[in-house]
Amino acid sequence: MKLHEYQCKKIFAAYKIPVPRGQVVASAGEAKRVAEELVGRVVVKAQVQVSGRGKAGGIRLAKTPSETEELTRMILGMEIKGLPVRKVLIDEAVSISRELYIALVLDRTLGLPVLIGSPDGGVDIESVAHAFPERIVRIPLDPLYGLCDYQVRELALGIDLPKEYWKSFTSIAKGLWAVYDQSDAVLAEINPLVITLDHRLIALDCKMTIDDNALYRHPDLNEMRDPDVESPMEMEAREYGLSFVSMPGKVGCMVNGAGLSMMTMDMIHAYGGEPANFLDIGGGASADKAASALKILLSDSHVQVILINIFGGITRCDEVSRGILRVYNPTSMNTPIVARMVGTKADEGLKLLRNTGIITAEKLSEAAEKSVQIAYGVRNEYID
């Protein structure tokens, strides 16, 4: 889950990371009031979770409260990369001497958090890493020890930071580690970290991404979700405890188990189709959960067929079938369903589905082939 800039700055400030004075607002009148309180130039920043806000006109400098009001009114009416701007952050303008980059990110290859820095802040760090890899400093951290002072000094040397800033830089880096660690983040980034003309270090812009699997430990962070960046189906799935991700294909998938879900999507690909989603109803799924999952798939207008693949272990296939039949109505539904079940109570589950209009299959390959044929009107040979 990504956080907005204003949300990140609130968290960073709580960990004593210096950020510009500012306030998030939802109207032009509020923006003018904040600009009057800040006195002087301010930056009006669209709060949308996409990159390239500045190039799209979503970040503007205002010299007066009246100009702040005018720019806010304009930005609040924008869409940036398909997302509506509902709030803007009014920050005090900062006179910049130099821009740096610092972040903590989970390296999934190493299985460790990595401290990253660069002397080239304020730009797309991926572009810098591609064109000038020598200008990226990477320091893997042992999570049991956290961030040590010698590692901060190593980073300061690597990004050519003058020594007079090392003390404040150490405080910022340690604060960033605390934010990352205590929030269960997979990314905590300051870009740019600026040296001001009056010789201060300030986190001018920042990002955070929280591990969704840890949100049950952070109800305060979970409340910060932005519904504009999530589909209604994903939000509904989360309410029912389902793992759901929308995808661009036509074959809706309802499966129990993440590995089996991936295998099912691979089989759809093998027969020339594209899955419309990843949907894992989990182990021991109840009839209620199966019914909820099917309702979500039926609400997706892109789904041309639904492939149900259940491997009964602790999940009872007959229980899943009962959930399906709570929702399935052949007289009012236009979306065909193909079901394959094996394992616990599979015979009973398939017996409930037969003669209802639901297509049954013994093998996953057969179910995937039938689903792709229905969705795309083609027949493909599966090559083992």
Image (spheres, grey):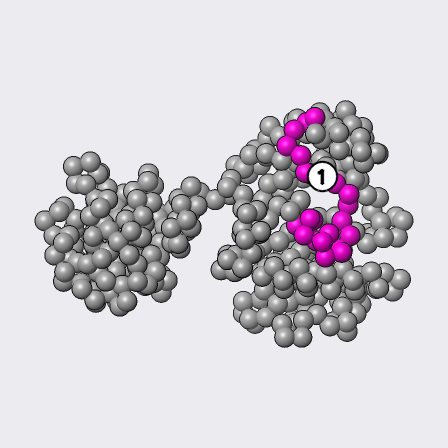
With 111 as the anchor, is 270 left or right in this view?
Answer: left
Residue 381 seen by the camera: no
Query: Is residue 79 magenta-colored?
Result: no
Residue lying at 84% horizontally and 44% vertically, measured from the top left: 95
With 79 as the anchor, is 68 left or right in this view?
Answer: right
Query: Is residue 13 magenta-colored?
Result: yes
- Residue 87 is situated, as x and y percent measured from the top left of the image, at 62, 35
| Start-end of magenta stretch | 8-29
User: Is residue 159 positioned above or below 231 on the image?
Assistant: below
Residue lying at 64% horizontally and 57% vertically, measured from the top left: 188
Name which quarter of the figure residue 113 lies in: bottom right
Mark 1 secondary-structure assignment: strand
- Residue 102 is situated, as x and y percent measured from the top left of the image, at 71, 59
Q: Amino acid at mark 1?
A: Gln
Q: Which residue is mark 1?
A: 23
- Residue 262 is situated, as x and y percent measured from the top left of the image, at 35, 61
Between 178 and 276, the one lying in front of the other is 178
Residue lying at 31% horizontally and 48% vertically, measured from the top left: 292
User: Is residue 19 positioned above or below 75 on the image?
Assistant: below
Residue 77 seen by the camera: yes
Between 216 and 77, the one lying in front of the other is 216
- Residue 330 is situated, as x and y percent measured from the top left of the image, at 17, 40
| Quadrant the C terminus occupies | bottom left
